[in-house]
């Protein structure tokens, strides 16, 4: 009988032990302040959400009406790699970009780009292995790398250089034999930086020399502004077996909630492993696949419409943010984020203040939710005066948000000394 006996290591009284990985997962800087925003809303205040990359552009009725006609009565599992017809539509989409991919053996549809990246890193990294990532970086990368037992080796970029991809010497100086992969986001989240073909070519050469995997998050590829161009890693020769591209329709089609992403690789051994992972979770979400296929085949203009709207929002944002005293905001070349430096000592304290004291001190009914910058770094002490701002609301609402931010910076009692007039 167990009654009355002490069992070493049982965790009785405090619950069974969690894994070591569980304790290493960081909170999301994008979502950690949402409870404060919800608290403000419960007090009758309005919050403009600029913390998360959630486009607010609704699907047109004509797409929704057509989609209703596509939904089958039996919502069954799909193929573990995704519906064959959907993969063929995606292959045609890539062909339009000048990239040939085999829908049968090089495309795997996933539950958003997050699952795609989790699959890929789980397949590439053993416990203790490392992946190099330019920072600031998309915060969820850190959690996913740690979930698979790996670690992030950050390669710093600077606001003074508009967060451009570092020289290869910076990668070389941080490289160790434990590094198995390089992960980039291009166009970049959180900075809006676009990596040029020349920068990417240097990175490709480095990966070939060190025999590293190259993982490219290209979910923002359509969001390019001012004639800026970029290049998919799938177009480089000589590293076909090194490259995995992570992709998603969440942003370009304004479909974040349907969770339809994908990965593309020409490495057949890796694809076979990833397919087995897909089989272990049975199938990707069904309805999102039908919706993506419908838009690709019959409403491809919708992607252009979404991108054009973000071009307008970017222009409005830049015009307004330039007038904010003490704010340093590089011009985003792509995606829909600005990674700005504020005249504050601690941006998380400031972001919390926006959702609490500012509403009383400013006598206002509207505030903004931003994402504190430190959470987008692995290197300690960086990003403490920075924030990521997502220009994901309409132009009128965006102007209002920046007016609110200007007022908040005027009233904030803890500005940097150099910013205090």
Image (spheres, rainbow, N blue to C red):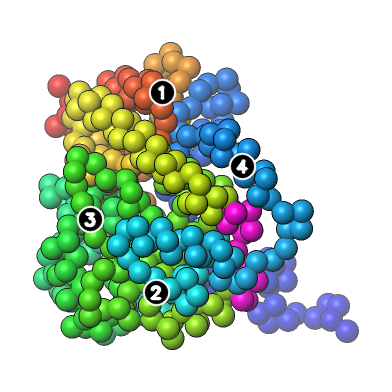
Q: For the residues marked 4 and 1, what is the alpha-carbon distance in whole angstroms?
A: 30 Å
Mark closer to the chain start, 1 or 2: 2
Mark nearer the N terminus (4 vs 3): 4
Q: CA distance from mark 4 to mark 2?
A: 32 Å
Magenta span of residues? 279-290
Q: Nearer the viewer, mark 1 or mark 2?
A: 2
Mark pair 4, 3: CA separation? 33 Å
Q: Is residue 253 above or below residue 201?
A: above
**Residue to which mark 1 is pinned:** 397
- Is 140 or 332 nearer to us in this picture? 332
Q: Are marks 4 and 3 in contact (CB under 8 Å)?
A: no
Which quadrant of the view contains residue 3?
Answer: bottom right
352 displayed left or right of 281:
left
The C terminus sits in image quarter? top left
**SS at circle 1:** helix
> What residue is shown at x 42% (from left), y 31% (from top)?
393
User: Can you tell which mark lies on residue 224?
Assistant: none
Determine the image quadrant of residue 232.
Answer: bottom left
């Amino acid at each position: 009988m167990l009654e009355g006996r002490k069992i070493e290591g049982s965790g009785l009284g405090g619950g069974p032990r969690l894994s070591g990985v569980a304790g290493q997962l960081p909170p999301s800087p994008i979502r950690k302040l949402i409870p404060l925003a919800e608290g403000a809303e419960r007090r009758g205040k309005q919050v403009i959400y600029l913390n998360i990359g959630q486009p607010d552009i609704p699907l047109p009725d004509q797409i929704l009406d057509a989609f209703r006609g596509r939904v089958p009565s039996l919502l069954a599992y799909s193929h573990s790699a995704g519906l064959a017809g959907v993969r063929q539509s995606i292959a045609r989409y890539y062909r339009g970009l000048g990239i040939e991919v085999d829908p049968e053996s090089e495309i795997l549809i996933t539950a958003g780009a997050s699952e795609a990246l989790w699959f890929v890193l789980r397949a590439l990294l053993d416990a203790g292995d490392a992946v190099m990532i330019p920072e600031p970086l998309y915060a969820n990368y850190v959690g996913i790398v740690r979930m698979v037992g790996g670690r992030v080796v950050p390669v710093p970029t600077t606001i003074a250089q508009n967060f451009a991809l570092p020289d290869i010497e910076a990668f070389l100086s941080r490289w160790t034999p434990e590094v198995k992969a390089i992960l980039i986001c291009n166009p970049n989240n959180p900075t809006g930086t676009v990596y040029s073909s020349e920068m990417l070519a240097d990175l490709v050469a480095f990966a070939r020399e060190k025999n590293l995997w190259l993982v490219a998050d290209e979910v923002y590829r359509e969001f390019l502004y001012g004639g800026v161009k970029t290049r998919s890693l799938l177009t480089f020769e000589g590293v076909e077996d090194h490259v995995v591209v992570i992709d998603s329709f969440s942003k370009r089609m304004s479909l974040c909630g349907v969770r339809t992403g994908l990965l593309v690789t020409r490495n057949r051994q890796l694809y076979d492993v990833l397919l087995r992972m897909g089989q272990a979770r049975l199938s990707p979400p069904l309805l999102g696949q039908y919706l993506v296929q419908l838009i690709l085949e019959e409403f491809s203009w919708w992607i252009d419409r979404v991108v054009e709207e973000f071009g307008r929002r970017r222009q409005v944002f830049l015009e307004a943010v330039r007038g904010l005293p003490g704010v340093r905001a590089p011009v985003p070349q792509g995606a829909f984020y600005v990674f700005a430096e504020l005249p504050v000592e601690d941006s998380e304290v400031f972001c919390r203040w926006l959702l609490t004291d500012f509403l009383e001190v400013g006598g206002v009914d509207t505030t903004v939710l931003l994402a504190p910058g430190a959470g987008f770094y692995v290197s300690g002490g960086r990003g403490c005066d920075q924030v990521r701002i997502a220009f994901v609301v309409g132009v009128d609402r965006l102007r209002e948000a920046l007016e609110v931010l200007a007022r908040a910076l005027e009233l904030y009692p803890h500005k940097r000394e150099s910013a205090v007039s």
